[in-house]
């Protein structure tokens, strides 16, 4: 199985976009996040911790997730955090743990704490970015409202686990 998602990040109050793609194989089970260096290791460990702490059972597969960065110096230390939510959504979609499987026409951004707190990019910042790009779907908190030309997928509808809310939205 393979999939991709469009991710946004903030750097010095500027918004940028990167593609994140991933696939699964029958290799030795595990998770690899490619092209983020030590930041990828931190995100990987957070994903594994959240998955285990929420008792989410994943198929025993090898998951490879790659962030398409042309220049690793493009992001600073804080910018990497905005990739946590898109990487988690991609990971769980590959594992068939969320109800949405087609993410390639979606974009999102968000930080996730180890307690499950999701912080999204402010709505006004997202709206300004939407006006300059052609995305058809945005995954954002349910209280965000967007233009009619963009389909809004409420984040809380995706991040549910058997009728139980997984994460707490704080923005």
Image: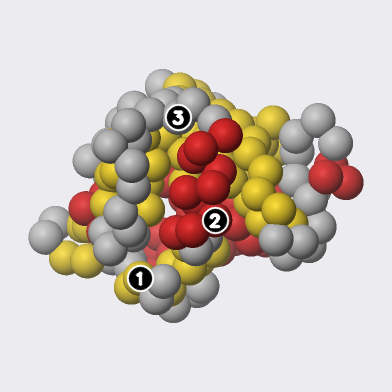
Which residue position is annotated with label 1? 169
Determine the residue positioned at 81% across, 30% down.
70
Find residue 121 and name its label.
none
Nearest to the eye among marks 3 and 2: give it: 2
Viewer-side residue, 55 vs 139: 139
Determine the residue positioned at 41% across, 22% down.
1
Determine the residue positioned at 37% across, 53% down.
140
Q: Residue 36 vs residue 171: left or right? A: right
Residue 96 seen in render: no
Q: Quadrant of residue 164?
A: bottom left
Is disc 3 placed on a helix, strand or loop? loop
Provide residue 53's location: percent of width, then percent of height: 38, 70
CA distance for labels 1 and 3: 23 Å
Badge 1: residue crowd in 10 Å (few <14, some 14–19, many ≥20):
some
Badge 2: residue crowd in 10 Å (few <14, some 14–19, many ≥20):
few
Q: Residue 10 vs residue 55: left or right? A: right
CA distance for labels 3 and 2: 15 Å
Which residue position is annotated with label 3? 135
Which residue position is annotated with label 2? 125
Q: Quadrant of residue 115?
A: bottom left
Nearest to the eye among marks 1 and 3: give it: 3
Q: Are marks 1 and 3 in contact (CB under 8 Å)?
A: no
């Amino acid at each position: 199985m393979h999939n991709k998602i469009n991710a946004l990040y903030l750097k010095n109050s500027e918004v940028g976009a990167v593609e994140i793609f991933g696939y699964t194989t029958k290799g030795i089970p595990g998770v690899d996040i490619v092209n983020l260096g030590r930041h990828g290791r931190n995100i990987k460990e957070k994903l594994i911790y959240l998955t285990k702490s929420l008792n989410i059972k994943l198929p025993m597969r090898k998951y490879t997730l790659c962030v398409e960065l042309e220049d690793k110096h493009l992001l600073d230390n804080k910018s990497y955090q905005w990739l946590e939510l898109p990487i988690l959504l991609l990971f769980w979609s590959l594992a068939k743990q969320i109800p949405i499987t087609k993410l390639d026409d979606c974009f999102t951004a968000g930080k996730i704490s180890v307690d499950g707190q999701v912080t999204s990019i402010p709505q006004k910042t997202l709206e300004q970015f939407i006006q300059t790009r052609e995305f058809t779907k945005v995954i954002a908190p349910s209280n965000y409202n967007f233009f009619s030309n963009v389909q809004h997928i409420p984040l809380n509808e995706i991040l549910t686990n058997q009728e139980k809310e997984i994460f707490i939205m704080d923005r």
